[in-house]
């Protein structure tokens, strides 16, 4: 992430980095393996950071719309950090959270809440988005690999080039 943020800041790229900060990495709580904050990492490169704590889609859209517009128009990078919860473990049997913590995550699960509120609409949108991602992955996978770029020509200052030519010809211009 550091290299991407550095280059995006240097080149003023319209890059939106979305961080799903769910408080746990594999089976280790974030507090036990992450020094500092996501915001401080963005700030180190002069990149804007916005932390989203809501799970309400309309609130999120209202918060992010002007920021995403700025990414496109300025252009400049933005790190959007979503504070969320993960329901299941990354793999079987590795979840170190207490049952109470998992239950709290389950109660705040926006995905299940939206699916239950309007199941037909949710299912339709979910199918459409999955199909979109599948088409995009297929399109990118079908692209030919780029040919390797030729190495850049070495720019030699004229005075150094002239001196190198004299040395190669055996005429250093020095007297013994």
Image (tube, rainbow, N blue to C red):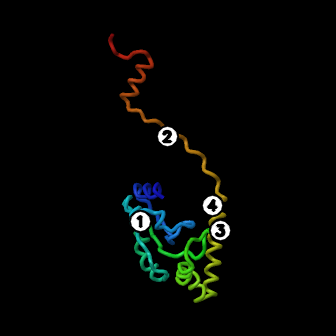
| In the displayed structure image, the side of residue 16 where residue 137 appears, left or right | right
* In this view, the mark in front (1 or 2): 1
* SS under mark 1: loop
* SS category of the residue bearing label 2: loop
Q: Name which of mark 3 and mark 4 comes first in the sequence.
A: 3
At 56% from the left and 85% from the top, the residue drawn is 113
Q: Quadrant of residue 67?
A: bottom left
Return the residue at label 3: 135
Where is 113 relative to 147, above or below?
Answer: below
Mark drawn on residue 37: 1
Residue 152 — which label? Answer: 2
State the residue position of label 4: 140
In the picture, measured across the screen, residue 131 lies left or right of residue 106, that is right
Residue 159 drawn at (x, y percent): 36, 28
Q: Point out the tag, 1 or 4, that comes first from the N-terminus.
A: 1
Q: Which of pointers 3 and 1 lies earlier in the amino acid sequence?
A: 1
* Residue drawn where x is 44% and y is 58% of the image: 5
């Amino acid at each position: 992430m550091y290299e991407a943020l550095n280059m995006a800041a240097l080149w003023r790229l319209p890059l939106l980095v979305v961080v799903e900060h769910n408080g746990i990495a594999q089976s280790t709580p974030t507090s036990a393996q992450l020094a500092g904050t996501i915001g401080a990492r963005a700030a180190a490169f002069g990149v804007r950071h916005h932390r989203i704590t809501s799970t309400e889609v309309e609130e999120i859209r209202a918060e992010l719309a002007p920021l995403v517009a700025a990414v496109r128009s300025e252009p400049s990078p933005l790190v959007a950090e979503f504070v969320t919860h993960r329901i299941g473990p990354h793999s079987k049997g590795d979840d170190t959270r207490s049952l109470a913590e998992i239950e709290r995550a389950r109660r705040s699960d926006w995905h299940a809440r939206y699916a239950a509120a309007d199941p037909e609409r949710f299912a339709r949108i979910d199918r459409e988005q999955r199909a979109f991602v599948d088409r995009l992955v297929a399109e990118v996978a079908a692209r030919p690999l780029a040919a390797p770029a030729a190495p850049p020509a070495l720019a030699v200052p004229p005075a150094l080039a002239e001196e190198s030519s004299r040395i190669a010809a055996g005429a250093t211009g020095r007297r013994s």
